[in-house]
Image (tube, coloured by chain):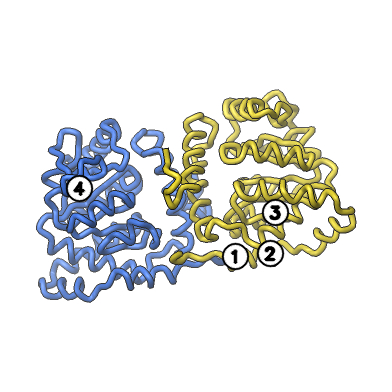
Chain colours: A yellow, B blue
Amino acid sequence: MISKSHPRYESLKLREKIVKASKSGYLADSAMIAHGRGEAFDYMLREKTTLPAKRAMYVTVAMMLLAENPVISVNGNTTALVIDEIIEFAKTINAKIEINLFYRTDERVDKIASLYREHGYPGILGSNSDDIAYINEIKNPRASASKKGIYTSDTILIPLEDGDRAEILSKSGKNTICIDLNPLSRTSKMSDVSIVDNVVRAIPFMTKITGDLKMQDEKLLRNIIEEFNNEDNLKESLKLFEIKEE
Amino acid sequence: MISKSHPRYESLKLREKIVKASKSGYLADSAMIAHGRGEAFDYMLREKTTLPAKRAMYVTVAMMLLAENPVISVNGNTTALVIDEIIEFAKTINAKIEINLFYRTDERVDKIASLYREHGYPGILGSNSDDIAYINEIKNPRASASKKGIYTSDTILIPLEDGDRAEILSKSGKNTICIDLNPLSRTSKMSDVSIVDNVVRAIPFMTKITGDLKMQDEKLLRNIIEEFNNEDNLKESLKLFEIKEE
């Protein structure tokens, strides 16, 4: 048990979730290393959601509200950290959830699918019984996608995605939105919208603003998207990283 | 197999070593997360040894050469990343090696002790058959140490050490030297000398300079140590962290 008074309480709780998920057998080998990298980047943002991240999230919600078939892609780390928050956001914004693992094994997919069922979300895509197709006919497991989901979707949110997969998605012409704490990662650079933030803050923030943006007319949503420049926004994010004494 | 042409080849090789060590069962649960944090910090140093790190290493070697009983403390991550380099450095500088695990289990200690034997170093301290005492009589596994090693040593090198343990060692009055990529970590702050560098570069660098410093007279070594100010050096390290495009 981590004491609530520990100065790193929030961070240690997340670490505990990742360790637990690893023991449950649904994380890839290097998933914990990826989490550690994220910890260090978040530390340099003082574990706060930045203005450029918020701006990217308004754009994301606008894009997802305007999309024909928005999909949220989930992997082991996302599930370990924010399963309930993802389900709530998907329901609020009316998006599908699809399992996509970079190192896909039937066992890990089954474990993750069961978790979503246990958390009250039975309709997850990308399960082992789902109909799979290959994006741009690339016969590579990294390009696999559910026919009802990412394969036919126009807008995809990919929290914590690998660079290879982000590249395939981005080249497919679909709107690709990532959540990644490293503004210099291939995933951040490949995406149309890059949210440089911790998923544990980003997903609930987007759920919160969805209610508000749902009330706005389409024109305003389109305007939010048109005014956004991802490259400039990433540059602005970059400037906010700092390693210094509290 | 990672291709040598991969832009992140060196970093991915280290990651592979950590994943392999984790599968071998001698890493603690959160060891991979710690490695990931290190990756991010090293990335911000462009994976280069900095001038303040080199300065701290000259001081370290001088201190170890002047010490009565210098000891290098090793854990799972150190073993996974630089077992041969640690053995070579210990032999060159005439220091002992002692296993010290934050989450100590007999099984992990046995596995690590066997690895050192297999790599040609039979005399490791801190094994399960070793005589253990408690630093400052603190009856806490975090204060345990070998009687022939850390318990009676005057100068200890602790690569990749946990903050709690670093604090106990530091308060014991022994010269405590850490290698830690995070200049703001408790370990870095608690140590008398803090080498902000990746162990895979730091250990071979110190082996290299040991030959040179061994030839110098004691007065020069004492002078190197006296001129050094760890707080100032840490501040200088801090300024070199940067997240930017290559």
**Residue A174 shows up from this direction:** no
Q: Which mark is residue B97?
A: 4
Disc 3: which residue: A191
Task: Find numbered disc 4 in the image and state the secondary structure of the residue it sits on.
Answer: strand
Q: Residue at x 69, y 40 (%)?
A: A73
Direction from residue A200 to residue B119 in the image, left or right: left
Q: Residue at x 42, y 41 (%)?
A: A2
Instruction: Compute the Cα span from label 3 to label 1.
Output: 16 Å
Instruction: Compute the Cα span from label 1 to label 4.
Output: 42 Å
Q: Nearer the viewer, mark 3 or mark 1?
A: 1
Tell me the chain of label 3.
A
Q: Which tag, 1 or 2, sits closer to the chain's start?
A: 2
**Which of the pair A218/B148 is nearer the observer?**
A218
Q: Which tag, 3 or 2, sits closer to the chain's start?
A: 3
Q: Residue at x 41, y 64 (%)?
A: B48
Q: Residues within 10 Å of mark 4 (few under 14, many from 20)?
A: many
Tell me the chain of label 2.
A
Disc 2: which residue: A233
Which amino acid type corresponds to the residue marked 2 in the rendered image?
A: Asn
Direction from residue A11 to residue A226 in the image, left or right: right
